[in-house]
Image (cartoon, helix red, strand yellow):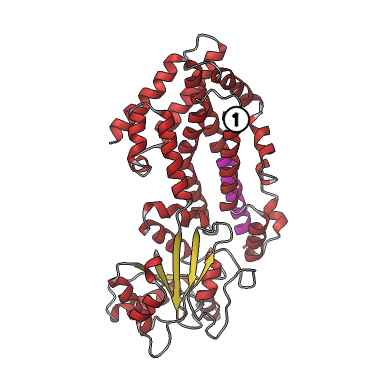
């Protein structure tokens, strides 16, 4: 499939290059814009990535229909933006499941909209908690499973288990009979589940009083103790994640997130990755790579609009694409004031020190005016002028304008993504320095 798609893409883009060969300075700019378009597509689409878009896009490209391909990509992006991820969190009363629900959404227990917590059971029925920035990511706090007459089949039917993508079973000590019975029932229904041993920070503080305390050894002892208990009850090769809901950046949260991401259907991975708190350098890098895979799609939509001979339309669409996508980068990397303050509180670092390492001008404001100014920079202004002139020339001009618009949008998105990802990296490094 890839060979055909790559051939189709090459044909379209090299055809554009042939039409706008450098016969003059204006043609040279068109040549550059279209070279960027071709090279960036070829560098950033592989077998797996292209197949995820949809067969219709490949077919449109093979038929040299840029507009049709862009339309299909718009449908794909709309579908991705509407995908919901429903995560169920359960466990015995007092296990810390409600605190975990809050932490997973980047919230503290006393924040507005947080799940209620307490030493007695506060969850009487399944309740949905939307992520404050990504409402498509929904974490469900389920009633406790610690009653003596607990019946897993009835429990799962009561909470409508079919709506959940996977389950997280939380325990603050060893996993008990009800946890294991529930896990087996979930397994029968062919759903994924993950064991989370919570409140691990409490164990570390208690064990840390010992004279010969070894944190890694202690963590492994706790992990193996939990695993053995599960194996003894007939659960083969279980994996247990040691978590502190008050310090997700430590212990096994990254491993938990990465495991869940790998085992989710492809169209739901993006929702999980973008919505989790930007707590580690590894998560930061994976978010950057996830955003990068969408750049060529958005640029192709931009190019298809530029091919329409309507003065000003391409510029308006490009600005809209850039503003919406850059805001996603900004929020997902946790560069807003609220996220920076939360990180500062968690890491015991003055928030001013975190803000001091921010270099991108996008951290001050992301608006239509800011993006327009970026597009009107000395280099891009000339390219955009050429695009505008070309867009008014039938057929030849439309094809050239499409390539230039693709190159401009691709360049801008990549530049802004790199800047904000670098800022997020520097913020995390500064926070870690304070430890």
Q: Is residue 177 magenta?
A: no
Q: Which residue is found at the position 57% from the left and 82% from the top?
A: 118
Q: Position of residue 25 (x, y in %)?
A: 56, 12
Q: Magenta residues?
A: 416-435
- The image quarter containing residue 115 is bottom right
Q: Position of residue 308 (x, y in %)?
A: 51, 25
- Label 1 crowding class (10 Å Cα cut-off): few <14, some 14-19, many 20+? some
- In this rendering, the answer to whether 101 lies above or below 276 is below
What predominant SS class does the magenta segment belong to? helix
Residue found at the far top of this picture = 23
| 410 and 402: which is toward the camera | 402
Q: Which residue is found at the position 45% from the left and 72% from the top?
A: 89
| 313 and 298: which is toward the camera | 313
- The image quarter containing residue 255 is bottom left
Q: Which residue is mark 1?
A: 315
Q: Position of residue 173 (x, y in %)?
A: 45, 81
């Amino acid at each position: 499939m890839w060979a055909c798609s790559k051939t189709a893409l090459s044909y379209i883009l090299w055809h554009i290059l042939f039409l706008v060969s450098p016969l003059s300075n204006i043609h040279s700019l068109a040549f550059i814009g279209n070279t960027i378009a071709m090279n960036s597509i070829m560098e950033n689409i592989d077998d797996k990535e292209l197949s995820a878009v949809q067969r219709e896009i490949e077919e449109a490209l093979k038929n040299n229909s840029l507009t049709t391909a862009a339309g299909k990509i718009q449908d794909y992006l709309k579908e991705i933006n509407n995908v919901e991820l429903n995560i169920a969190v359960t466990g015995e009363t007092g296990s810390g499941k409600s605190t975990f629900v809050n932490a997973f959404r980047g919230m503290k227990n006393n924040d507005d909209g947080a799940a209620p917590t307490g030493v007695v059971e506060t969850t009487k029925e399944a309740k949905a908690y939307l992520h404050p920035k990504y409402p498509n990511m929904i974490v469900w706090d389920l009633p406790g499973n610690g009653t003596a007459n607990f019946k897993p089949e009835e429990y799962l039917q009561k909470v409508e288990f079919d709506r959940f993508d996977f389950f997280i079973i939380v325990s603050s000590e060893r996993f008990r009979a009800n946890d294991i019975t529930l896990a087996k029932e979930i397994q029968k229904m062919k759903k994924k589940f993950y064991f989370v041993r919570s409140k691990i920070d409490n164990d570390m503080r208690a064990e840390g009083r010992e004279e010969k305390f070894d944190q890694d050894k202690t963590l492994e002892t706790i992990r193996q103790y939990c695993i053995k208990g599960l194996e003894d009850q007939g659960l083969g090769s279980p994996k247990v994640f040691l978590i502190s809901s008050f310090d997700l950046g430590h212990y096994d949260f990254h491993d938990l997130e990465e495991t869940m991401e790998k085992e989710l259907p492809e169209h739901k991975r993006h929702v999980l990755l973008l919505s989790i708190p930007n707590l580690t350098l590894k998560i930061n890098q994976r978010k950057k790579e996830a955003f990068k895979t969408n750049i060529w799609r958005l640029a192709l939509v931009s190019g298809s609009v530029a091919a329409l001979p309507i003065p000003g339309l391409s510029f308006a669409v490009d600005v809209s694409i850039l503003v919406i996508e850059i805001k996603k980068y900004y929020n997902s990397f946790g560069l807003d004031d609220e996220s920076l303050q939360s990180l500062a509180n968690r890491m015991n670092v003055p928030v001013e020190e975190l803000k001091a390492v921010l270099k991108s001008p996008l951290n001050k404001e992301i608006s239509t005016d800011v993006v327009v100014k970026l597009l009107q920079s000395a280099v891009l202004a000339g390219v955009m002028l050429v695009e505008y002139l070309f867009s008014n020339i039938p057929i030849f001009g439309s094809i050239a304008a499409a390539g230039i618009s693709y190159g401009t949008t691709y360049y801008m998105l990549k530049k802004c993504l790199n800047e904000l990802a670098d800022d997020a990296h520097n913020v995390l490094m500064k926070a870690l320095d304070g430890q």
